[in-house]
Amino acid sequence: MFKWREARYEDLEALPEALPEGVDPEEYVIATYSLSLPSALDAWEVARALAIEQSTGTWVPVPGETPEVRRKHVAKAVGVYELPHYEVLSPTEARERNYLVQIAFPWVNFGRQITMLLSTVAGNLMCWEKIKLLDLRFALMINYLTAGLSVLRELAEDPSIKVPILAHMDFSGTMYVSPYSGLSSSLLLGKLPRLAGADIVVYPAPYGKAPFMKERYVRVAHQLTFPFHHLKPTFPMPSGGITPSMVPEVVEDLGKDIVIGTGGGIHAHPMGPRAGARAFRLAVEAVMRGISLQELAKEHEELRLALQMG
């Protein structure tokens, strides 16, 4: 399947494989993938082939791919971890085996060009049926740009813009929903827009109309808010079918430094949108004061009716 063979390259620095401790974290971006392979394939051979495919070569050796070129530009498979991790006997009955694969990509291959970065870490290798990019680990802060995110980045750096920049997640479902391919939600909805300078990121909440695992939902918020070099935190903005009754759970899951997105939860209020907005403010007030929504609803008709909406 792959015509590359390790024996052709005796220089260890030119190999598409290294120990994790053998690559300088200041000079590489580490990509982590989930990968399912037919049992007959050697996972390390596949990982090395993917590293070459996305850096210095292709599926067959090429004349210009010299050891000198490889030393500077070749990506390196630094980790292949089978799940479960068989040590004595491999499962003869299994048609597929599952792996976490980590590949280190030289920073020099793409520099500050985020378009080239994503073309590298999620390029031809994503043609495999069951491979998903889960995360990217950066040692340095970069201007993180793609064709769409570049516009966001330019807005974030424009000193004439004096309002917070909100990044919406429409179209993201085409890229993260599959469990086998695409990008992970935490990378697509969390780390990338934060790197591009978004102040607020709208993304699906699992309480209302959006199908989204709560553990993934919380992880996105962590990517937006946890310490990340010198980047400022970005406000998570859960949305999609959220009503005032859900405010305590939202705050319980994500904390108080958030923005809540709601449309129908306000405009569908039986007393009208003004009352719907008031009900949401009262729900937030109750949570901040540490009292139940039901207790505060005894004093406010808007909130009482909103709680009946679900």
Image (cartoon, rainbow, N blue to C red):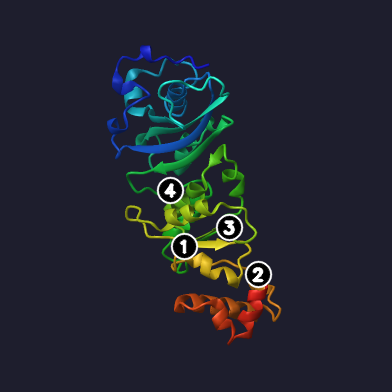
Q: Residue at x 67, y 75 (%)?
A: 308
How far apart marks 3 and 2 lie (CA) works out to 14 Å
Front label number (4 vs 1): 1
- Disc 1 to disc 3: CB gap under 8 Å: no
Give the labeled residue for mark 1. Answer: 254
Give the labeled residue for mark 3. Answer: 206
In the rendering, which numbered label is found on residue 36?
Answer: none
Q: Residue at x 36, y 44 (%)?
A: 138
Query: Where does the image place residue 220, in percent across and percent down from the top left?
Result: 48, 53
Give the labeled residue for mark 2. Answer: 310
Q: Amino acid at mark 1?
A: Leu
* Among the 4 quarters of the image, the one containing residue 210: bottom right
Query: Where does the image place residue 305, in percent across and percent down from the top left?
Result: 66, 79
How far apart marks 2 and 4 lie (CA) works out to 40 Å
Query: Where does the image place residue 71, in percent across and percent down from the top left?
Result: 32, 24
Position of residue 272 in the picture relative to residue 90 (left or right): right
How far apart marks 1 and 2 lie (CA) works out to 20 Å
Give the labeled residue for mark 4. Answer: 144
How far apart marks 4 and 1 lie (CA) works out to 25 Å
How far apart marks 1 and 3 lie (CA) works out to 12 Å
Front label number (1 vs 2): 2
Front label number (2 vs 4): 2
Q: Secondary structure at mark 2?
A: loop
Report the residue that reaches farthest toward the right: 270
Q: Secondary structure at mark 4?
A: loop
Query: Where does the image place residue 23, in percent across and percent down from the top left?
Result: 30, 32
Q: Amino acid at mark 2?
A: Gly
